[in-house]
Image (tube, helix red, strand yellow):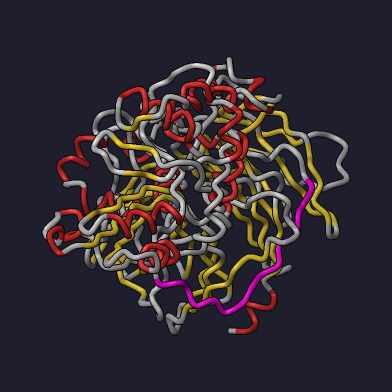
């Protein structure tokens, strides 16, 4: 809102006075009001305050600029309880944008703000700023880059370029600088980094030919926007009210029909966030899921609270856990057999006993990794576990693979022909036709991939071959995947340049034809974040059970999906 007499800058220019109602309540007190205020003396609130210093209150920032001599106003000091130096960011309004265009014949206007308020990450972002009494008022009216671009062009600016921060980071930051930053400390929050950057934009508007040479404008496109996916329909989501599965970075596996084992991850336990060391078993009885308690018999072996590991069911009574990490510096967790009873029903009175057994050591390099995949393949009538990709404490992206013979429990050299694929982590892998289907992932350049690769069995080994999709599916990572009746299902994930979030993509493996389906979450009362989740496909029901998911959203806090979600796929699987 523009009101009052104009302020005088140190250079003599007149600026309109901008005063927003909530700011008048007084600078520091805005941080101490409401629920966040009661936690303000805690470590978490202190961290949020430090990170969000530039967003505290426009009145604090204006008081700071007055104290430093940028503007002359003797009254601003009375609107804050304590003078604090703040970055000179104020609430940009349409009035200021238009005023600046009218009063400066030659100028640049650069803005760094939020966008995309309605997707899951955007909703969490808005909730965070609302708790700080710093509501993002313009988001509803200007929700994306195109809306912001029109905003400036319609108010007198001759040129306007807008890109999100993923594009800015990839296009403006030199590669050697990106490598230097990545080497400073262990980093494993890729999903939250890319989601945060996709929800912030940098805008540069200009007028006057004298500024046409500016490096900022010469490198930025006139307008940049991702092509929205061609949505073929929607899938209804229903809540499965099951406690104890608020987590991410875990793994779920179907150990027999309608019995799901979930292991590890990071989540909520006894009211606190931590690495989870428990196991969780769900058994479907009729149309409902029932929880069975689990007792671990460790035999001297410890689970260790693994994240980003894999668990592969290799028989009716045992599964193999490979790799994972407790921290980005500790990934030497090895391999464990998980042994469980031959039969389990929802009516059994006893808890499920899972025994942890260490096998004979396999290749250390095969197991000292995380964000990898393990897939059962066949070669000359023998079963192998194909361990592919991921990352390690030393290498941010791995492109190697191992064939672990499941009976002898040793890695064998098997010839693999064809072009060697780009290394990746956080991809998906499915068994199919004796080989493995690899889809998506995050590549060495830090960009999501949109390739589908088939490790095809041959007479003497395997052959890499690509699977072309039409249209090409949008690059993604941190998704899950399943194969059913010649169709590859890609579920959720993170992508960078689209205005929607991934739902379910169905790829016909015979024709390569792909279709995208949105997930209708109207029945859910919380943002459904579909990355770092797990999913179980029930072919006899044509249903997907989505378990967990979420992440640590920087200063916005940790979000964990509240309950598992069921997706009915019968319509989309029969419509293609």
Residue at the spot 39% in from the left edge and 27% down from the top edge: 86
Residue 134 in the image, given as x and y percentages of width and height: 56, 38
Q: Residue at x 33, y 32 (%)?
A: 71
Instruction: Residue 79: give x, y in percent of width and height.
Output: 53, 25
* Left or right for 393, reference 148: left
Up the image or down, 102 lies above or below 192; here it is below
Residue 228 magenta: yes
Q: Quadrant of residue 258?
A: bottom right
**What is the residue that sits farthest to the front in this orientation?**
5
Residue 432 x/y as whole percent: 48, 67
Task: Decide whether the magenta segment is chiefly helix, strand or loop.
Answer: strand
| Residue 388 visible within the image | yes
Q: Position of residue 126 (x, y in %)?
A: 58, 45
Residue 491 sits in quarter: bottom right
Q: As drawn, is 352 to the left or to the right of 378? A: right
Work out whether residue 386 or residue 101 is closer to the camera in this orientation and state it.
101
Q: Is residue 549 above or below residue 208?
A: above
Q: Residue at x 33, y 30 (%)?
A: 186
Tell me if I can see residue 403 in this picture: no
């Amino acid at each position: 809102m523009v009101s009052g007499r104009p302020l005088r800058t140190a250079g003599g220019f007149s600026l309109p006075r901008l005063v927003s109602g909530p700011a008048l309540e007084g600078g520091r007190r805005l941080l101490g009001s409401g629920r966040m205020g009661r936690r303000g003396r805690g470590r978490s609130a202190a961290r949020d305050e430090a990170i969000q210093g530039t967003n505290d209150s426009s009145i604090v920032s204006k008081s700071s600029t007055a104290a430093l001599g940028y503007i002359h106003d003797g009254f601003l000091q009375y609107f804050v309880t304590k003078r604090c130096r703040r970055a000179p960011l104020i609430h940009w309004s349409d009035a200021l944008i238009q005023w600046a265009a009218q009063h400066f014949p030659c100028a640049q206007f650069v803005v760094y703000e939020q966008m995309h308020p309605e997707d899951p990450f955007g909703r969490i972002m808005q909730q965070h700023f609302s708790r700080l009494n710093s509501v993002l008022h313009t988001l509803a009216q200007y929700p994306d880059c195109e809306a912001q671009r029109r905003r400036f062009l319609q108010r007198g600016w001759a040129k306007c370029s807008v890109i999100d921060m993923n594009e800015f980071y990839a296009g403006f930051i030199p590669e050697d600088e990106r490598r230097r930053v990545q080497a400073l400390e262990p980093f494993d929050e890729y999903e939250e980094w890319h989601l945060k950057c996709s929800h912030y934009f940098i805008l540069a508007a200009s007028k006057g030919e004298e500024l046409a040479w500016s490096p900022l404008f010469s490198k930025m496109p006139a307008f940049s926007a991702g092509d929205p996916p061609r949505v073929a329909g929607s899938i209804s989501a229903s809540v499965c009210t099951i406690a104890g599965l608020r987590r991410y970075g875990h793994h779920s596996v179907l150990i027999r029909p309608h019995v799901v084992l979930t292991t590890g991850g990071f989540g909520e336990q006894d009211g606190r966030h931590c690495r989870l060391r428990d196991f969780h078993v769900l058994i479907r009885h009729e149309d409902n899921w029932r929880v069975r308690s689990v007792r671990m018999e460790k035999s001297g072996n410890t689970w260790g609270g693994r994240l980003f590991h894999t668990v592969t069911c290799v028989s009716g009574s045992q599964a193999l856990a490979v790799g994972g990490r407790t921290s980005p510096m500790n990934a030497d967790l090895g391999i464990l057999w998980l042994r469980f009873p031959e039969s389990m029903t929802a009516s059994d009175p006893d808890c499920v006993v899972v025994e942890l057994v260490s096998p004979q050591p396999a290749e250390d390099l095969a197991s000292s990794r995380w964000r990898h995949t393990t897939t059962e393949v066949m070669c000359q009538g023998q079963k192998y576990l194909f361990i592919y990709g991921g990352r390690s404490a030393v290498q941010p992206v791995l492109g190697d693979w191992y064939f672990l013979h499941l009976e002898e429990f040793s890695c064998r050299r098997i010839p693999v022909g064809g072009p060697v694929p780009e290394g990746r982590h956080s991809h998906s892998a499915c068994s199919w036709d004796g080989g493995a289907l690899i889809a998506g992932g995050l590549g060495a350049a830090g960009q999501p991939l949109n390739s589908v690769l088939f490790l095809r069995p041959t007479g003497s080994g395997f052959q890499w071959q690509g699977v072309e999709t039409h249209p090409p599916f949008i690059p993604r990572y941190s998704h899950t995947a399943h194969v059913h009746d010649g169709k590859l299902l890609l579920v959720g994930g993170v992508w960078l340049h689209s205005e929607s979030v991934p739902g379910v993509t169905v790829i016909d493996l015979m024709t390569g034809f792909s279709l995208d389906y949105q997930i209708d979450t109207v029945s859910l009362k919380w943002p459904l974040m579909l990355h770092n989740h797990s999913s179980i496909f029930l072919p006899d029901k044509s249903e997907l059970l989505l378990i967990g998911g979420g992440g640590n959203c920087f200063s916005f806090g940790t979000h964990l999906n509240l309950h598992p979600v069921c997706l009915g796929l019968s319509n989309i699987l029969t419509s293609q």
